[in-house]
Amino acid sequence: MLPISPFTETPGAFINTEGRLQGFHATVKPLGESRPAWKVLRVLGGLLGLDGFGFETADEVRAECLQGRDVAALLSNKTSVTVSAAAPAGKGIERIADVPAYFADALVRRAESLQKTADAKPPRARMNANLMAELGVADGDRVLVRMGTGEARLEAVADERVAKGCVRIAAAHPSTAALGAMSGVVSVEKISVREAA
């Protein structure tokens, strides 16, 4: 294990959704003897006698990586795939998953203050009123969701933003981890009061 500090403790850059290179500064100093990854790699490169590891700043590393190229010009959303026919509709209920902001990485998952917010509430099975009626489920009922060999017991919530035939269940949470993939066919059934107890 290398003593690499998290991204909050190092300057760096990322490509934003507009395709622009955006830099950032460290918000705090690295804890203890940890160091930004580029510094750890610089030391390893030096110890191994490799060329190209003599950088003094993160800006020098970035300049070397880009070599004067325009990042936006390197990006493209073009595709050469041609779709000739729509795929047949699958049978069953399709899981739609998101990763809520405060489940996204180890830093936010371990931040007690963030885990006490409304955005960190445990996942629920969100579906529109039509699907709930088909399943005989009411808002607030407990449901058993199965996907492959995994299952999750969740609260059902009416949400008209969810497409017909779909259930929205957040990923990256212990209560839904057993479901596996973030998309695919699931089964949803109401849990009786006796089973829930």
Image (cartoon, rainbow, N blue to C red):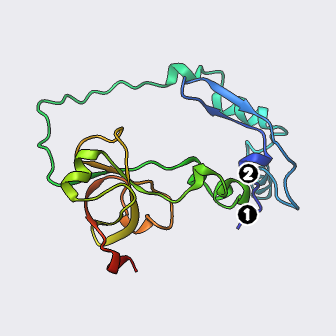
Determine whether the residue tagged by mark 1 lies in a helix, strand or loop. loop
Coordinates of residue 185 in the picture (x, y in percent): 24, 56
Q: State whether residue 50 appears in this view.
A: no
Q: In this view, does 189 lie to the left or right of 77?
A: left
- Which mark identifies residue 186? none
Question: Residue at coordinates 44% horizontally, 48% vertically from top-left?
Answer: 98
Question: Residue at coordinates 64% horizontally, 28% vertically from top-left?
Answer: 66
Q: Do the residues labelled 1 and 2 touch (CB within 8 Å)?
A: yes
Coordinates of residue 174 in the picture (x, y in percent): 50, 67
- Which mark identifies residue 37? 2
Q: State whether residue 134 appears in this view.
A: yes
Q: Which of 132 and 80 is in front in this view?
A: 132
Q: At label 2, which amino acid type do we have?
A: Ala
- Counting other residues with Cα less than 10 Å from the Cα at mark 1, is it few (<14), some (14-19), or many (20 or more)? few
Q: Is residue 132 left or right of residue 107?
A: left
Quadrant housing the C terminus: bottom left
Coordinates of residue 24 in the picture (x, y in percent): 75, 34
Q: Which of 1 and 142 is in front in this view?
A: 142
Determine whether the residue tagged by mark 2 lies in a helix, strand or loop. helix
Q: At label 1, which amino acid type do we have?
A: Leu
- Counting other residues with Cα less than 10 Å from the Cα at mark 2, is it few (<14), some (14-19), or many (20 or more)? some
Snapshot quadrant of residue 59: top right
Give the Cα distance between marks 1 and 2: 9 Å
Q: Mark 1 points at which residue?
A: 2
Q: Is residue 65 above or below residue 182?
A: above
Quadrant housing the N terminus: bottom right
